[in-house]
Amino acid sequence: LKMRAGGIGESSKWKKQKRSPRPLRHMVQSPSDPSNPSTLSNNLSGVALIPYGLPCLRELFRFLISLTNPHDRHNTDAMIHMGLQLLTVALESSYIVNYQSLLVLVKDELCRHLFQMYLKKVMDIITSESTKMPYEMKEMGLEALVQLWRIPSFVTELYINYDCDFYCSNLFEDLTKLLSKKVNGSPFMNNDAGFALAYAVIMLNTDQHNHNVRKQNIPMTVEQFKKNLKGVNGSKDFDQDMLEDMYNAIKSEEIVMPDEQTGLVKENYVWSVLLHRGATPEGIFLHLPPGSYDYDLFTMTWGPTIAALSYVFDKSLDENIIQKAITGFRYMSLQLLDSKVMKQGLTNDLPKIHISTVGC
């Protein structure tokens, strides 16, 4: 009767209130988004409770990057592989360029881990002397470097930004020597020769730069340095020009290896210096059109390339490898004939390559 007359019983009031509970006293709607009832703020602290905000994403992103650290002994190969896969998904499914906190992690930690991991792994594979390292694995490592060489302007930019920079190593020259390495144990005839030369270098560094030694003796001359190494390279002499270059380099700049600049401490220091330089005008990466500085690059590469091909052709007994060497000779010949370098007066310094003499 009460309901028909428009009234509501006490039990009905209670049921309606139970179905539509009021907000708790200490939780109110966030002023940042009043239209969203799920966004709440703590009335006591005044901090918005956002469960999936940017700080959460940054921490997750940082964790995934930490899985790719090759120097962390807890990161197994499987964990690093998983971290790379998850990072690939994250980068492909999001646009982080507008979020500086995420971009900093990519520029610093992620780039550092990728550089160290990729280059270290490739170099270890290529230079490995272990019989357990399959030939196919070394070939894959070389192919990985060759893929970099095929990027337009990569070689030129590598040469300009590193080899021509006073503070950087000759990265292009070193990689070129690595790719053409065979240029047979040279310059050492045996392991003892390497140890003897290393010991001589240490003694020379001490003789030239230790103040206590310099007070008592006259510094060693280049002829004395050569004489100390006479006949120690498998009863033969080292290359005299190489010894002279080593002497002059050590004399002009001391070899310094402090304990605090070894291992991870050294890597952290070098990386921080690189980041610091990257934030200055010196850190600007120069982009050049393809074909720039061909003359300079070709004068550095044609010698080691011909030497490596000649060694492979002379020593190999595998027909497939011999054919690859012949293909390399043919390609070099075509490049020499059709290169701008030929027009710049380099022909007199180049070796005569007769394709007919190698069975083409």
Image (cartoon, grey):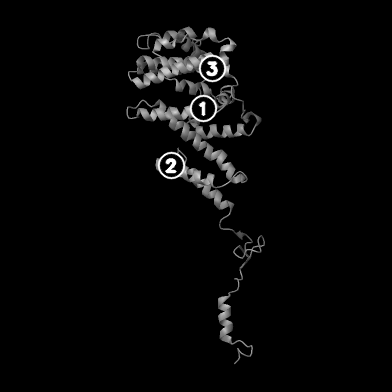
Q: Who comes first in sequence, dot 2 or dot 1?
A: 2
The disc placed on residue 150 is: 1
Q: Nearer the viewer, mark 2 or mark 1?
A: 1
Secondary structure beneath dot 3 equals helix
The answer, for residue 99, to whether it is visible in the render is: yes
Task: Report x, y in % for residue 36.
Answer: 63, 63
Question: Which quadrant does the C terminus fall into?
Answer: top left
Q: As drawn, is 129 to the left or to the right of 180?
A: left
Q: Nearer the viewer, mark 2 or mark 3?
A: 3
Category of crowding for the residue at label 3, using alpha-carbon neighbours closer than 10 angstroms: few (below 14), some (14–19), many (at least 20): some
Q: CA distance from mark 3 to mark 1?
A: 15 Å
The answer, for residue 203, to whether it is visible in the render is: no
The disc placed on residue 337 is: none
**Residue at image coords 41%, 18%:** 325
Task: Report x, y in % for residue 188.
Answer: 39, 15
Which three-letter amino acid code belongs to the residue tagged 1?
Arg
186 shown above or below 20: above
Question: Which quadrant does the N terminus fall into?
Answer: bottom right
Q: As drawn, is 94 to the left or to the right of 76?
A: right
152 shown above or below 64: above
